[in-house]
Amino acid sequence: MAEVRPIYAVHYDPERVEIADVTAPPYDVIDDAGRAELLGRSDHNVVELDLPRTDDGSNIYAHAAELFGQWRADGTLVADEEPTIWAYEQDYTDPDGNARTRRGFLARVGVTDYGPGLVRPHERTQPGPKLDRLELTRATEHNLSPIFVLHPGDAWSLIAPAIDGAEPFCEVTDPDGTVHRAWPVADTELHEGLAELLDGAELLIADGHHRYETARTYAEEVGDTGDHRYVLACLVSLEDPGLSVFATNRLLHYTSTAQRESLCNTMQELFDMEEVEPADLVPPEDYGEVAFGYMDSHHKQAYRLRLKSGQPLAEALPEASEAYRTLDAAALESLILKGPLAMTNDDIAAKRGLSYCSDFEETLRRVEAGEADAAFFLRPTPVEQVRAVADEGETMPPKSTFFFPKLLTGIVFNPLR
């Protein structure tokens, strides 16, 4: 059963630092230039903890732990004496230019195995990121960034009265233009109400699969009971009107002449191919059960591809559910990446000859500039389909979903000891 509890939070002292200067996007979307820019704002930026580096080759995880201890000792980081949940709002603009607000709350969630009535994953994971996050957790003994979890029910209706008219702890605008606001709430009756509302609820991991599986491993390493049996999470209702899933496009690199010829033959055989303008590459939702856009860097002709028949997918994925087989990303993986391009699961996991980009204009630019041999332009996966696949106990191909906006790292940390 879902076990949702308040946090004995560790957080930055707003009297010592500007919260906007010390928070950061998730570690896995920060490149070297982005890291340098964040540290240019403040040498106390959370990126020093969550994405640690050293100049002398010393252990980066020990470095993060040492810094965390220093910042606790000098008062940069403070620990609350009473438990809180943190109401969390994110104002953002969707791809159609609409202003939207996603609402949820930060708390800690009991770590369980995957399964019905417990926690469901929806994407496959790779071992490398899990080992990195495990080493960081062992060293710091804190969750430094929240996973993103979807829940049934309306938790916000319980939370909203508690923050009505209150000044937020922070208001931060990130590089994507998203405005993040958070309020700590120490009301024990509210905590009990949220725990009761979500007792027995099945939770779906939207983002943070590697960190959740790391939390499971860490909990078993420590053993017994205690704070280490929980993980920091941002919980958002499946019915929240601000919940959005964006698409992630696939770019191909280093393809051979034989692969390109085989790819062309496969597309002509299995798909209806409609010539369109580049701006119209992404098919509309009602274009077909399985469909995506395609453009290569040689001909630069844009196409919409619509699967002619479901039979090839039934043959390629005989054990898969209907919900899984009708995923655009699953069809692309099984019929194209593993078909004429002969990629294995290991190739896909290691991104050999493959890269991802969630920005349509940037994906198009890379193809037109010859930085990629070709690209497939995907539609967003509906939340309902994400849930249906998870309910079948299946996990999607990597980057099947891009839940936007991303959560901010550095608002609150969850102690594990």
Image (cartoon, rainbow, N blue to C red):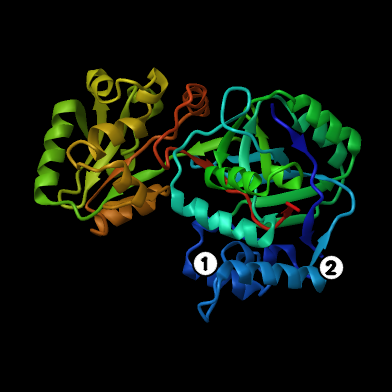
Q: Is residue 74 above or below residue 386?
A: below
**Residue 206 percent location from the top left of the image:** 56, 37
Q: Is residue 89 above or below residue 69?
A: above
Q: Earlier in the sequence, mark 1 or mark 2?
A: 2
Instruction: Please state, as top left, top right, bottom left or bottom right, where the N terminus lies in the image.
Output: top right
Which disc is residue 166 wearing? Answer: none
Spatial CA distance of label 1 from label 2 is: 26 Å
Label 1 crowd bin: few (<14), some (14–19), many (20+), radius 10 Å = some
Q: Is residue 127 above or below residue 60?
A: above
Residue at point 73%, 51% (across, down): 416
- Residue 339 appears left or right of 17: left
The image quarter containing residue 5 is top right
**Residue 70 percent location from the top left of the image:** 75, 73
Residue at point 21%, 31% (across, down): 274
What residue sits right under mark 2 in the picture? 15
The image quarter containing residue 118 is top right
What amino acid is labelled 2 in the image? Glu
Q: In the rendered image, is residue 339 in sight?
A: yes
Circles 1 and 2: CB distance less than 8 Å?
A: no
User: Circle 2 sits in a helix, a strand or a loop, which is it?
Assistant: loop
**Residue 41 percent location from the top left of the image:** 64, 72
Direction bottom: furthest residue: 56
Which disc is residue 34 wearing? Answer: 1
